[in-house]
Image (cartoon, rainbow, N blue to C red):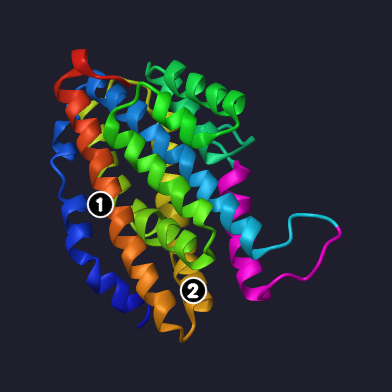
């Protein structure tokens, strides 16, 4: 088995995601705001997948030791560098999460819910408690709970699977579609930061991070059939959880008065 085999086996879930009816529901500035207010949790918890990989695959403590495969260390550190300290549209260093929050503010989306959630995470020091006791849509809770369950299980190839097939590999196609809708439907709204964020992701993920992440999976699994099987299982689940997240966001767009985000 290899990454090509995985891509083939998860094609049905990818097609469901890429053809999701959510894309056609973002028709107004208010719809866009609801989208951003739900999607920001995926932008945030992606960073935890990334840092979990860095912790597992490189040395992040002292005394330093040459942990693992130098090729994998390089791959993950390159991705961390861009995701955690990229250049924003004003030429300053920011993480992609911080860029996203700034883009939300610029187009009038509410950031108080995500900020309150992160404050609770810091307060409880237990991500599962914070997720469970939040007022978020159940599918958004399930999405994040899955992410942190994979992280807690601690298998590098499974974390890499959720990172690669559930996230990085899909971002260019999804964001290209969303970006087209934004440009067509909101010409009078200041979306410069948001468009920059999307275009930056398309550039990085299609040209650099996507291929790097695939190489990382190949290196981590090698010829181990059990690891490849687990990668396949986690990848399918990650996509199903992402579809659930898209369902939740669509529901909150269609029924904003009932939204819990």
| Residue 166 in sight in this render | yes
Query: Vertical placement of 6 versus 237: above or below?
Result: below
At mark 1, the secondary structure is helix
Determine which quarter of the picture holds residue 136.
top left
Residue under the image location 68 percent in, 74 percent down: 70
Q: Which residues are magenta?
A: 63-86
Determine which quarter of the picture holds residue 252.
top left
Residue under the image location 43 percent in, 31 percent down: 131
The numbered disc on residue 240 is 1
State the quadrant of the C terminus: top left
Task: Specify the farthest residue to the right.
Answer: 63
The number of discs equals 2
Task: Specify the farthest residue to the top.
Answer: 257
Give x and y (percent) for residue 81. 63, 52
Pick the front one: 227 or 97: 227
Magenta stretch secondary structure, dominant: helix
Query: Vertical placement of 105 versus 216: above or below?
Result: above
Pick the front one: 141 or 178: 141
Real-space Cα separation, disc 2 to disc 1, in angstroms:
23 Å
Residue under the image location 21 percent in, 52 percent down: 18
**Which sits earlier in the primary sequence, circle 2 or circle 1?**
2
Give x and y (percent) for residue 43. 44, 39
Query: Vertical placement of 251 versus 88: above or below?
Result: above
């Amino acid at each position: 088995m290899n990454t090509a085999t995985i891509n083939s086996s998860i094609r049905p879930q990818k097609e469901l995601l890429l053809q999701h009816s959510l894309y056609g529901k973002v028709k107004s500035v208010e719809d866009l705001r609801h989208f951003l207010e739900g999607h920001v949790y995926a932008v945030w918890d992606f960073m935890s997948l990334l840092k979990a990989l860095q912790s597992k695959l490189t040395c992040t403590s002292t005394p330093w030791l040459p942990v693992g495969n130098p090729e994998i260390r390089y791959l993950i550190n390159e991705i961390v560098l861009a995701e955690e300290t990229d250049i924003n549209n004003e030429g300053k260093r920011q993480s992609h999460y911080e860029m996203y929050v700034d883009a939300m503010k610029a187009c009038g989306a509410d950031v108080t819910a995500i900020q309150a959630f992160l404050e609770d995470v810091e307060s409880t020091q237990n991500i599962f408690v914070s997720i469970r006791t939040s007022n978020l849509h159940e599918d958004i809770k399930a999405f994040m709970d899955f992410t942190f369950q994979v992280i807690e299980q601690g298998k590098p190839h499974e974390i890499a699977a959720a990172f690669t097939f559930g996230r990085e590999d899909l971002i260019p196609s999804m964001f290209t579609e969303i970006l087209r809708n934004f440009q067509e439907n909101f010409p009078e709204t200041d979306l410069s930061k948001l468009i920059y964020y999307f275009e930056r992701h398309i550039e990085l993920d299609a040209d650099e991070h996507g291929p790097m992440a695939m190489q990382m999976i190949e290196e981590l699994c090698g010829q181990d059939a059990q690891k490849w099987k687990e990668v396949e299982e986690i990848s399918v689940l990650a996509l199903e959880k992402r579809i659930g997240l898209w369902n939740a966001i669509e529901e909150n767009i269609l029924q904003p008065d009932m939204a819990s985000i």
